[in-house]
Image (cartoon, helix red, strand yellow):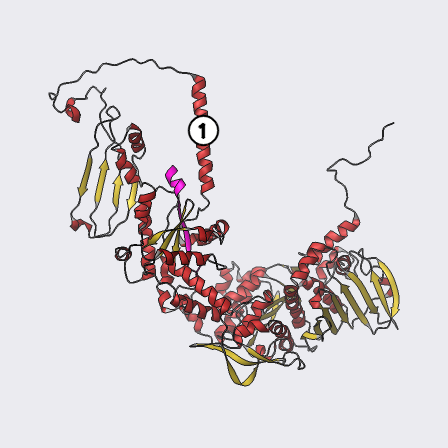
Amino acid sequence: MSDVCTSEPAGAIRAIDKHSVHRICSGQVVLSLATAVKELVENSIDAGATNVEVKLKECGAEQIEVSDNGRGVEEANFKGLALKHHTSKLRDFSDLIHVETFGFRGEALSSLSALSDLSVITCHESSQVGTKLVFDHKGHLVQQSPCPRQQGTTVTLQQLFYTLPVRHKEFQRNIKKEFSKMTHVLQAYCIISTGVRITCSNQTGQGKRSAVLSTGGSQSMRDNIGAIFGPKQLQSLLTFQQVCPSENIMEEYGLKVGDLPKQLFTISGFVSSGDHSVGRSASDRQFFFINSRPCDPVKVSKLVNEVYHMYNRHQYPFVALNIAVVSDCVDVNVTPDKRQIFLHEEKLLLAILKSSLINMYEAGVNKLSLNYTPTVSSASKEVHLPVEDKAESTENNQPSTLSPTSPMNLAALKAAFSNQNSALSGSKSSTEKASKIGPSQKTLKCFFEGSVKSPLRLRTEATKGSLGAQAELRGFRNEEVSIREKDSEPERDLVVESPDPQHPDSSEQVVENVKDDSEARTPVKDSVIFPEAKRPRRDDPCFTAEETPDTASSTADVPICLQKKTVPLHFCLQALAAGIKRLQQQQRRRAADKLRYRRFRANISPGENQRAEDELRREISKDMFKKMEIVGQFNLGFIITKLNSDIFMIDQHATDEKYNFEMLQQHTVLQGQRLIVPQKLHLTAVSENVLLENVEIFQKNGFEFLIDEDAQVMERVKLVSLPTSRNWTFGPADIEELIFMLSDSPGVMCRPSRVRQMFASRACRKSVMIGTALSVGEMKKLVIHMGEIEHPWNCPHGRPTMRHLANLEIISQD
């Protein structure tokens, strides 16, 4: 008797087992170190704690411990503490409208138990002794034992994410970035949690535990800001003063005065003064709260920065704003981390914010807003450029659009790049420079005339060729090729008549009309026109010998009688169908070949710079630069290279400048000048740790520090030497910028923006200039250098270094 198959069919829909569901959902709730710490700190504050201590080992990669002095957990709640959707905050969905606690879903501990080894030590306010609880990955209580502990709770997580191998590996690899993000999130809770003392520390290896941040439990948000960011930050802050929105701003947001609800929003907090140099180089200190809940309101953040840039457009403000709103006008149950919040009457909130901020800044000494222009002009970008580059920075105002795949519009190609080159060189016209081309140079016209026949050349040669060439010529009828040449040249119209199909040996008539030089005082367009020939047919009754050149000796007005000849035509429908099929296959092959060859589709135009750069990055590898063949130099400013069938144009100055810039970036060690008295930096504990972990990078940038490991946090580092270079001077602002960059990329060599500007200026001055004739060896050296740098596609000032011109195979097919 055969066995009966009881297995379910493939693709059958069935329920996922509960354990798998638990792991999948837990990975969506806790996404990072910041999320894990946030959930535990929120639980502590919800429990009424006035003292919260966060302890990390190896930046949180090994262990996370959060202790508090809150109410603790009652024994009756031990079993449900880490179960999914078990909470004391809600009973039904309607309670969500009036929820005032940070947590309310009952997901935090359950998710953390699935992603790590979770243990809890707690002592309820009604208990005399504490209890240690150990949970498995399903959130079930597996061990319970007495443990001495004062009132409160301690939650410990070991090896976060180790149950998800891929995420765990990524988490360990990026632990420095994770730690930096966690610190920023924790700073928000330190600012808004008045009356709560929050501390955070980290231990590396068996070393001493170092403080990351600390607040003193003050009832003032301002004091908390000072405790985290130091007294220097407080000196530049303005207290937010809320005003009613003005009529103009109301109209801007489509609001009417009569429709405004009363006191829907109450905004409090602090923002930076609009004075220059008191802002920050990045938006790393901006904190927004709705009903004291840290969140990320994108529109609010964008508005605050836009208004600030009206008064200080080169920096970003410090922001700490708490928006109090009626609970039934806000929805916090949007995302798992609760940082995205929906608000009713959001436009009204934006109108209040904008009016209040403008009123605050206008009331102060910041009157520079009268000169504000929303778009940064090219002139404003020239402030830090060297003199040689000021003319170059205007190149984007010269549109030069060429289609690499169009028929060889050769003179237009030359004129477009001549216009671009004239913008780069400034004083001399491109045609004047072209007249000085040295023996090792070629013009684009010379190159293409030697490689691919231009349309004009094809048509001229067709007049001397066979019937097939004449048929090719007829295919160019009614085609016009525009050629922009020098204004001083006369205008020429060349008309090439089509040959007579009945007389393949008849010669072509070429009529050249040269206009007087006086008519060429203004720029004109030279045109090569191939008009449709209108010649009478020989079988026309009106046809006469007078109209035929080869019968000029005949008597005038004497009609010629032509006899018709009947020729049998052999026709086969199958052969015709086969021929059509072959023709269609050939057309498809040609189309596929063109698509294969057209790897570069971007035009040479400022609007397509990013697209062109993406194509080059995708198609050109570093080793390809060595294989490029030097064709010549164009207009004393551009190197024309050939790789297989592709033609490229390289800006000789821009590419040399980028190479010199990257060499300066990598190898220059700035010399420092010692200060008479060591200077306090007033760094936060987080910034101080970043500096201590990347001292070598600061030293390469010319900064020297006096480090006292035994001193108090925020006072362990003092500045003793500053980098100087000729007219460039640097200071604490550059240190803060470096710290911000290293927070995102720990251990990566980087430079402050002002150091990069200095290097860009030096690189520009030492690079090959436009107008310099180069030998083939010199051009080859510049091209090879492009393969030796990390980012060869743009110079330090943003000008493109290389563009694709054309593909010879596509041109020959066309």
Residue drawn at 80 percent across, 36 percent down: 7
From the image, which quarter does the N terminus lie in?
Answer: top right
Q: Quadrant of residue 15?
A: top right
Q: Amino acid at mark 1?
A: Gln
Is residue 139 left or right of 713 when viewed as pictured?
right
Mark 1 crowd level (few <14, some 14–19, many ≥20, 10 Å Cα): few
Quarter of the rendering occupied by the C terminus? top left
Of the pair 117 and 582, the residue shown nearer to us: 582
Camera sees residue 796: no
Q: Quadrant of residue 243?
A: bottom right
798 in magenta: yes
**Which stretch did the figure color magenta?**
794-814
- Side of 412 relative to 590 (left or right): left
Q: Position of residue 434 (x, y in %)?
A: 28, 55
Q: Along the line of sight, which residue is nearer the eye, 614 or 802? A: 802
Up-down: is 213 above or below 660?
Answer: below
Which residue is painted at 14% across and 24% down in the image? 546
**Residue 439: x and y, percent?**
29, 54
> From this viewpoint, which residue is outermost toward the bottom?
676
> In the displayed structure, would residue 643 be above or below residue 430?
above
**Image quadrant in which you'd find residue 141:** bottom right
Q: Position of residue 163 (x, y in %)?
A: 75, 56
533 and 791: which is toward the camera: 791
Residue 550 shown left or right of residue 814 in the figure: left
Q: Which residue is mark 1?
A: 584
Q: Tell me the element at label 1.
A: helix
The vertical placement of 209 against 424, above or below, is below
